[in-house]
Image: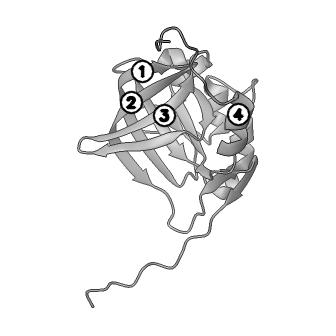
Amino acid sequence: MTGSESELRTVAAEDLRACMRLFPTGVALLTAGEGDSAMGMTINSVVSVSLSPPTLLVSVHQYARIAGRLVPGAEFSVSFLSADQAGLTRQFASADRPAGEAAVVAMGGARGANGVPFPVGAVGVLECLVDRTVPVGDHNLVIGLVVRAELGLADCSPQVFHCGELTTVHSADRPIDAST
């Protein structure tokens, strides 16, 4: 039997989901657009791809409202949320999440140099340009060139998604400089 004649055997979606819930991930807010066209979506699929050039990847369902905004050359931001922003996480994960100026207000009114809104109090914000998108299954992998990075407060704990719950990790003490 050839590969084309046999069915590809994969794990059931619910088994993959159950296993992936065991892997802690950071929580971020993906934003695009300005003013009345602004929108955001909670995500936890963010990957640093390269430092040269600075590149990241986010995974977005092909039918997500924000997917149509993430075309080559478009500007977007990825904001890493702090542990105290669980309400914002839930708000932008819901089907009735705000859009337009209501989204900007919900995030606290901050805008990046690219004009894209981002949440006040985020641990960090990366402003990006879409380099390309790659369809994979029912998602699009959005590859973005990072054009600006803004660090939040050093004493903020990041928000983490683990076993279906929002939690955090606490910062370890800074490592001792071995050269001294």
State the quadrant of the C terminus. Answer: bottom left
**Mark 1 — residue?**
134
Question: What is the distance, in whole Å, between disc 1 and disc 4 at their CAs?
Answer: 23 Å
**Mark 4 — residue?**
93
Asked if the residue under mark 1 is in contact with the one under mark 2, i.e. CB atoms within 8 Å, the reply is yes
Instruction: Indicate which label's residue lies in the foreground, 1 or 4.
Output: 1
**Mark 3 — residue?**
58
Q: Is residue 169 above or below residue 111?
A: below
Mark 1: which amino acid?
Answer: Val
Asked if the residue under mark 4 is in contact with the one under mark 1, i.e. CB atoms within 8 Å, the reply is no
Which is more N-terminal, label 1 or label 2? 1
* Picture quadrant where residue 137 is located: top right
Q: Nearer the viewer, residue 101 or 72?
A: 72
Q: Secondary structure at mark 4?
A: helix
On the image, the x and y values in percent for residue 164 come to 75, 46
Question: What is the distance, in whole Å, between disc 1 and disc 3 at their CAs?
Answer: 11 Å
Q: Residue furthest top?
A: 5
Q: Residue at x 54, y 75 (%)?
A: 172
